[in-house]
Amino acid sequence: MITRGLIEVLDRVNHPLTIVTKPSLVLRDRDILSSMAQRNLCSVAMSITTLDRDLARVMEPRATTTAARRVATVRALAAARVPVWVLVVPIIPQINDHKIEPILQAVARQRSAAPTSPAGDCLASPWPAHRCRVR
């Protein structure tokens, strides 16, 4: 497990880390990430393109983690008190731009069910109207 080994080294030397990912494999390292988060050394950014399975297969044909699993991963990381960013990208006009609000709502529902992380969480969007902090 190369990734875990690298995270362990970063943890030992107190070096900050941000992970940008789609797969839920990040959960296997939540113990270390949680410890690092207590020292404000890490955060995780989870990419969610759409909640629509059919559209997801077209937009991300090689993605192995479903949107539902990604949303659950956000909740699990937040429960471990790891700051989580949700990246709603890519956004393609007329294809998935109308899917932003359901993604934000799904993440907010999951996030509100988890304990508040020390740094809070942020939902990232290219449009200011869709940016918000969820606690």
Image (cartoon, rainbow, N blue to C red):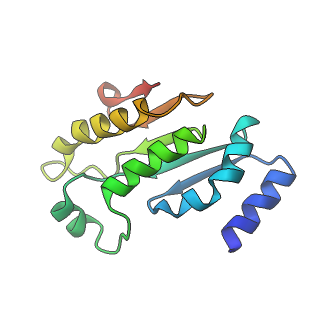
How many marks do you count on the picture? 0
Residue nearest the viewer, comparing 62 with 94: 62
Above-or-below relation of 24 to 72: below
Rendering coords of residue 126 (x, y %): 35, 38
Residue at 41% x, 29% y: name it. Answer: 112
Q: Residue at coordinates 23% horizontally, 36% vertically from top-left?
A: 101
Closer to the camera in the image, 41 or 115: 115
Residue at 73% over, 44% down: 36
Q: Is residue 45 left or right of residue 67?
A: right
Q: Residue furthest left?
A: 94
Q: Could you tell me residue 62's position as x and y percent?
A: 34, 75
Q: Is residue 47 visible?
A: no
Position of the N terminus, as image quadrant, is bottom right
Residue 116 on image: x %, y %: 54, 27
Q: Is residue 125 above or below residue 44?
A: above
The answer to whether residue 103 of the structure is visible from this angle is yes
In the rendered structure, the answer to whether residue 77 lies left or right of residue 8 reads left
Q: Nearer the viewer, residue 44 or 106?
A: 106
Query: Relative to 61, is 100 above or below?
Result: above
Residue closer to the observer: 128 or 98: 98
Query: Which residue is painted at 63% across and 28% down in the image?
Result: 118
Quarter where residue 8 is shown = bottom right
Image check: 24 left or right of 126? right
